[in-house]
Image (tube, coloured by chain):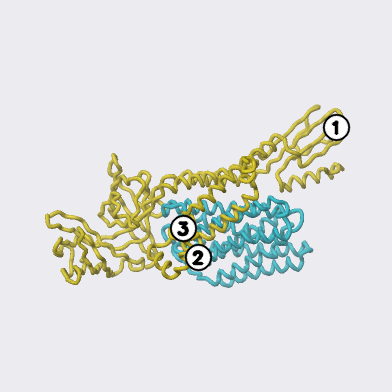
Chain colours: A yellow, B cyan
Amino acid sequence: MLNKLWRILSSHTLALWLLISMTLVALAAGSLPQSARLSPEQQTEWETEWEATASWLDTFGLSQIVGSDWFAALTIVLLINMTAGILLSFRRKLAFYRGELKPQYELQRSGPGPEPPPFLGEKPEGVGSQSRVQGIPGLFGLTLFHLGIAVVVLAGFWRGAMDFSDYVELSVGEVFSGQPSKFQLRQEPPEPFDAVLRLDRADIEVRDEKYMGEFRGHFSYQQVGGSTQQASVVSNHPLRLGDFAIYPKQSFGHSAQFERVLQDGSIRHLYIHFEVETNEWGKPWRGKKEQMIRFDNMPLYYSMSLSNAVPPVFDLKVNQGEKVIFEGSLQPGDLADLGAYKLRFRAMVPWMTFNIALDKGVTPIFIGFIITLLGFLLHLLFWPRRVEWTTTDNGWMVQAWVRRGDSAFDEKWNAWCHQQGLEVS
Amino acid sequence: MTLLLQWMVAIVYLSAAGILLIHSRWPQMQKVAIGLVSVGLLVHVAMVLVRGLDSGQIPIMTRYEDFTVDALSMVAVWLLAQWRWPQLRQSGVILLPLAALIVIIALSYSRGVFPMSPALRTNWLVIHASLNSLAVGFGALTLAVGLILKGDRMDLVGRFMSWTFLLWCGMVAAGSYWASIAWGRFWGWDPIECWSLGTIFIYAFVLHLRMKPRWREGYWSALVGVLPFGLMMFTTYGLVFVMRSVHGQYVFQ
């Protein structure tokens, strides 16, 4: 029973079926609407407009292919099949190395024999055997390649359990210490973000009035137990903070910075962000926004517009239900009394979006990639060959073991045999 | 000027393919075809270099540039391969018209120069895109050799396919590393990432299939060899037209 299971799991036919299945699965994951890829709005739109199809895909687990149990199961079976394949082929390769397999080339004659050409190594001095093995890295290249894949898959599973990535929008001067309410996708990191950082400056450079030139955020930050440090976050150069890393995400704009003065006199900060298109940055601009803002269970409906005039102007109309409780224009320093609290317009500052991701477990994946590529490169560059000469009192014999498709050896062997007037076996 | 040169390059490749087709058994004429292709390739390389120097950035960002460089890679890989294995010359009958077609298709896209977005200004773009172009070059060679070559050198098809596979895997790995430092994720199951992975799997499938003797040569072997190349071409060129992808957002403006 166990033997049969082993034969099935390690079979080449199973590998073929799994590979073609994985091809179809990858293409399906790339083509069908996947819930992990859709925004909540896109998801609703898809489920409304294609109700029957969406439900059908859901039923068969095709709306979230890579997160499904059957995909994980398929990957695990492939991993087992691959591991079994590695073990079997490794055994064959060891046998090749030791000359325990049946040779592909063999020539046996009587007499002293010819002087061997360089590709056939050297004959023993007297009676006896002499063997030469070349291209050993190529012998184990494919083993290394499959081992690398196993590392990538296992590291991927390990990392998948603690995957975290979310966005935060930060205004210049704003402090972030991992508060969950700031994460735009409302995800919770699997481990605490134990650092405090402040966006000190935002450099947004636009080229030719419409193309993103540079996008750089300058931070002051402090990790637990450490001192305050400064660093910049720029494309392809994330800021690493412990297991987390901060990456620039190129959405940005102007932020209206407020102090919210509560009835007991305490002050809270409030930033209202207006997104600006790249081609509008640095030009006279006015942005509009309507938003329900809720503090202390009191929802107020804000209709706002912000202009980057000098000084900046913030037009505000606040409704509580049907009742207008404030309407007016604010400039820096002006106060708006909204009843439950007052808003003081402080300034207009830039804001930027940053992606915060848990960086743990990525290194083993890239080590796996390197092993994989290196293994395959060795397989392609080195051609393993084993040649063994045996001389006896009566004659000589040469045997050779090569990799399938080693046409260079085949050509040389045939040419040599022909040159020696020997019959090829 | 670029338009004229590009048409000239395409016509030279087509003419060379015509010569190879008509004079398949006449080595002297085959050499004329190789000479023509070499001249065409020199002009092709010069065009790409001049564009790169003019724009001050590596010319593999727009559709026009991508098609132009991929066609260049196809011809360069073929030229080197036929130099090493002269019996592969005849595969130019398929590869050269394909390269000419891609050169002509490139002309249907804007030849404007667009400044790179910040995430693209890295050597990883050079590595990622170059490996992609090389993989396309080797893929086209594999296809052409598989369809043309008969007999005892069919092992070359497997060898070229293996190189295509390695280059494509390298391209995916480089892209993955780049994504991890640019966006904070090494893999996002974006459509183009899924299709690239699908291409890896189909190449792995065909390479494993070729371990069985009956799949190493003949009609079925050639037919199966078309499959991964088709998928690679669609992933490289076609996918961004039908699916929204991060590549459409950052590249091919």
Q: Earlier in the sequence, mark 3 or mark 1?
A: 3
Q: Is residue A381 visible?
A: yes
Query: Circle 1 marks a residue in which chain?
Result: A
Give the Cα distance between marks 3 and 1.
Answer: 69 Å
Report the amino acid beneath label 3. Answer: Gln
User: A99 above or below A365?
Assistant: above
Q: Residue at x 26, y 66 (%)?
A: A291
| Tags 2 and 1 touching, CB below 8 Å | no
Instruction: Determine the chain carrying the residue at label 2.
Output: B
SS state under label 3: loop
Q: Three-letter amino acid code at disc 1? A: Gly
Q: What is the CA distance from the residue labelled 2 to the residue labelled 1? A: 68 Å
Q: Secondary structure at mark 2?
A: helix
Is circle 2 on the same chain as circle 1?
no
Can you see residue A145?
no
Residue A271 in picture, x, y percent from top left: 24, 59
Q: Residues within 10 Å of mark 2 (few under 14, many from 20)?
A: some
Residue labelled with disc 1: A395
**Mark 3 crowd level (few <14, some 14–19, many ≥20, 10 Å Cα):** some
Instruction: Give residue A248's position: percent from left, percent from top.
Output: 37, 55
Secondary structure at badge 1 equals strand
Q: Which residue is mark 2?
A: B240
Residue drawn at point x = 29 percent, y = 56 percent: A170
User: Residue A337 sits in which quadrant?
Assistant: bottom left
The residue that label 3 is drawn on is A64
Q: Amino acid at mark 2?
A: Val
